[in-house]
């Protein structure tokens, strides 16, 4: 079975094999490996030694996003959230339920967040201290122009949180070039092709120190994770970790570096997405995004209007052919999505397209365009 979902992703057999062991997290043989992993992740983010630190947190991507919002936005503080998809909506809820005040820029699905819109919102409300933005909006496959947005935040003298959960390791963002950025946050199980269970923030040390006491949650306090490392050493893990997932992550980092790092991974995913987009359009399906806005993480297709179409049946029949995709839509209009990330290659995309064509034929879906 090949997973073609945007996380957890298809993994290398070596990554899976690393999970099959019992590990003591605080053993002296484990500590140096864990400390080294933190430095490797900081380097991938472009973080500077002495300026940035890598802070792992047990849990999924939502956990690390909430931790960043709690840590860098004070209770009752305003955070600007440009929202152009489901993950912007989720970020808004995380901020509100953490006792922060989200100021939302509502942007139609399929349209990018612009630096101009961010600058205008910041100029209109001096009380907004932080902007939090989704880099890769996995609901729609859109990539927001984070460099331009960061420049607008810097020009306005505000702070930035980058939700890079679905794109980190493939879509570049260089922390060293962006002093306005408090943290970039992401998870282990997407473009780094490891197992789920760990969120990461690569954050500025000065901001962690300045924002100590903000979180209102011991579990979600990035400043406390930093203080723990200072007190107990960078090889120490605060609370019981998903240690088998960390062992798998170490192997995934080895594979990432051998492949050629971020540029090579982006190149492979871009070619995967191209093969998917072209192949699915060739089957008569209608893409959710035009080609010039199609990102490299997932490809979204509008669901056919044919009466024979039914999403769950399509997913089940495709699964019998060896490919598993999401069985739900993440857009306002009905779509289905196929991931281009994970340990998959263009030849896998070609096989997936062929299997999708066979599945549509078996279902009797002849009217495949959306309109």
Image (cartoon, grey):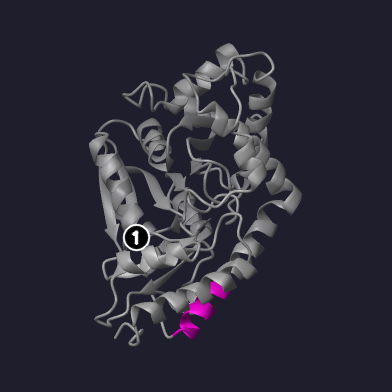
The vertical placement of 98 against 5, above or below, is above
> Relative to 35, is 202 on the left or the right?
left
Q: Position of residue 243 (x, y in %)?
A: 55, 26
Q: Position of residue 156 (x, y in %)?
A: 42, 50
> Relative to 116, is 41 on the left or the right?
right
Q: Secondary structure at mark 1?
A: loop
Residue 112 location, quadrant: bottom left
Callout 1: few (<14), some (14-19), or many (20+) C-alpha neighbours within 10 Å? some
| Residue at 45% in and 28% down | 222
Can the viewer see residue 141 in this picture? no
| Residue at 63% in and 26% down | 34
| Residue at 50% in and 67% down | 295
> Relative to 144, is 259 on the left or the right?
right
Please provide the residue range marked out in magenta.
275-283
Residue that badge 1 annotates: 327
Q: How many marks?
A: 1
Can the viewer see residue 255 in this picture? yes
281 magenta-colored: yes
Q: Position of residue 270 (x, y in %)?
A: 60, 67
Q: Position of residue 212 (x, y in %)?
A: 42, 23
């Amino acid at each position: 079975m090949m997973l073609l979902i945007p996380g957890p992703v298809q993994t290398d057999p070596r990554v899976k094999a690393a999970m099959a062991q019992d590990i003591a997290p605080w053993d002296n043989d484990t500590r140096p490996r864990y400390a080294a992993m933190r430095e490797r992740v900081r380097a991938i983010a472009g973080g500077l030694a002495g300026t940035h630190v890598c802070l792992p947190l047990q849990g999924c991507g939502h956990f690390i996003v909430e931790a960043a919002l709690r840590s860098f936005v004070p209770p009752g503080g305003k955070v600007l959230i440009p929202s152009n998809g489901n993950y912007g909506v989720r970020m808004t809820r995380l901020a509100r339920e953490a006792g922060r005040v989200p100021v939302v820029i509502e942007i139609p699905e399929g349209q990018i967040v612009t630096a101009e819109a961010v600058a205008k919102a910041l100029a209109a409300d001096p009380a907004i201290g932080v902007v939090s933005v989704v880099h890769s909006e996995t609901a729609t496959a859109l990539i927001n122009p984070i460099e331009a947005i960061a420049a607008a935040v810097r020009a306005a003298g505000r702070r930035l949180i980058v939700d890079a959960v679905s794109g980190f390791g493939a879509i570049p963002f260089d922390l060293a070039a962006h002093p306005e950025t408090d943290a970039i946050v992401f998870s282990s199980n997407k473009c780094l092709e490891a197992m789920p269970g760990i969120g990461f923030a690569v954050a500025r040390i000065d901001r962690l120190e300045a924002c100590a006491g903000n979180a209102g949650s011991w579990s979600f306090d990035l400043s406390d994770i930093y203080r723990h490392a200072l007190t107990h050493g960078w090889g120490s893990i605060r609370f019981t970790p998903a240690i088998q997932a960390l062992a798998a992550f170490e192997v995934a980092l080895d594979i990432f570096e051998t492949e050629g790092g971020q540029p090579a991974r982006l190149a492979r995913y871009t070619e995967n997405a191209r093969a998917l987009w072209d192949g699915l359009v060739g089957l008569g399906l209608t893409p959710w995004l035009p080609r010039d806005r199609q990102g490299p993480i997932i490809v979204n297709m509008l669901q056919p209007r044919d009466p024979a179409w039914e999403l769950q049946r399509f997913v089940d029949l495709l699964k019998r052919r060896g490919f598993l995709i999401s069985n739900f839509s993440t857009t306002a209009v009905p779509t289905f999505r196929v991931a281009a990330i994970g340990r998959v290659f263009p030849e896998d995309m070609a096989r997936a397209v062929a299997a999708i064509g066979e599945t549509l034929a078996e279902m009797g879906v002849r009217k495949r365009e959306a309109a």
